[in-house]
Amino acid sequence: MVEERAFTQMLQARNVAAALQPIVRVTDGRLRAFEVLGRGQVAGLPDSPMGLFGLAMRLGKEVELSEAFRWAGLSTAAALAPEATLFVNAHPKEMFQEPFYRSIALLRAMVPTASLVVEVHESAVTQIADVRAMADRLAGYDVQFAYDDFGAGQARLLELAEVPPHFVKFDMGLIRGLDSASPKKQQLVAQLVNIVHDVGSTALAEGVETRDEAACCAQMNFDLIQGYWTGRPASGDEIRRYHPHYVATGMAAVSAVLRHRRDIRDTQAG
C-alpha cells in the first residue's frame, strides 16, 4: 500500500527523471540523434525503468508511466537540445489510441524545433491497418516513427514492406556478439539491413558494446549505432557532454580503418 501510494503520487506529479543516450552515424561517429529515456527518482521506488514498469503493470498504470517518461524527457531535451532529433518510446498498451495521439501532439508543441521519432515496439504491431493509420496521424504532426526491437520476436517483414518506417532499430539480441556469431547469422542480419535499405528506411544497430560489434555493423552497412560503446545514457549536467559537435571517437576510428581497407582493395582491383 505504501509503495502504491508513492507510485500514484509520483505519476500525479510527474516526478520522474530523464536521460538522453546518443545515436551516432556509422560513417564518422558524429551525433545524429538522442533516445529519450525515463528514470525513477523517488525514494522507496525503483530507479530503473524496468523496475518501475514492473510496478506499473501490477497497478495497471503502464500508459501513465510511459506518458510521464516522455514528458520528462522532452522537458529536458527542450532545454538542452531543442533542435535535436529525439526518439521517444511508447508502451504497446497505448499505441493506436486517441489519448496517445493527443500526447504526441502536446509533445510536438513542447519542442516545435526538434525532430521527433516515435518508437513502435514490435509487439504492438498486429494489424497493418493500425500501423498505416498511425503513420498518417504522426505525419500530420510532422513526427516520424521507427520500428523498435526489430527481430526480437517476429521480423515484421510484411509490415516493413507495407508501411516502411523512417528508422528500423535492430534488437540488441541480434547485435550482441554479432562479430563472433555464426556465418549464417551474420549473413541473415546483413540481408535484413539490405531489406531495410530497399524499402527506404534507415538501419540502426542498438546495444553495441564493443569495438568489434561496431566494426561488424559498419561492414554490414548499418547507418546508425546506439550503445554503451558510443555513449551511455546521461542525465542532469552530464547531458551537456553530448553537445551538437559530439563525436564517438572510437566509431570514427573504426570507420576510418574500414574506409582505408576498402580504398586499398579498390586500388588493387583497379
Image (spheres, grey):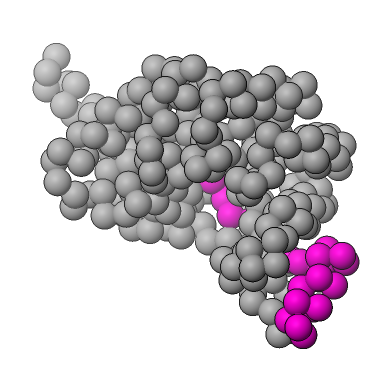
Q: Residue, x 54% and y 27% (percent of image)?
A: 127
Residue 25 visible to the viewer: no
Front-lying residue, 229 or 266: 229
Q: Is residue 249 above or below residue 6?
A: above
Image quadrant where residue 198 sits: top left
Q: Residue, x 35% and y 23% (percent of image)?
A: 195
* Quadrant (top left, top right, bottom left, bottom right) of the N terminus: bottom right
Q: How many labels were placed on the picture?
A: 0
Q: Where is residue 260 in the image (x, y as percent from the top left)?
A: 26, 34
Q: In this view, does 47 lie above or below 111?
A: below
Q: Is residue 44 above or below residue 132?
A: below
Image quadrant where residue 146 sits: top right
Look at the image and give the residue range highlighted in magenta: 1-28
Q: Where is residue 121 in the image (x, y as percent from the top left)?
A: 54, 43
Q: Residue, x 58% and y 54% (percent of image)?
A: 21
Q: Residue, x 63% and y 63% (percent of image)?
A: 57
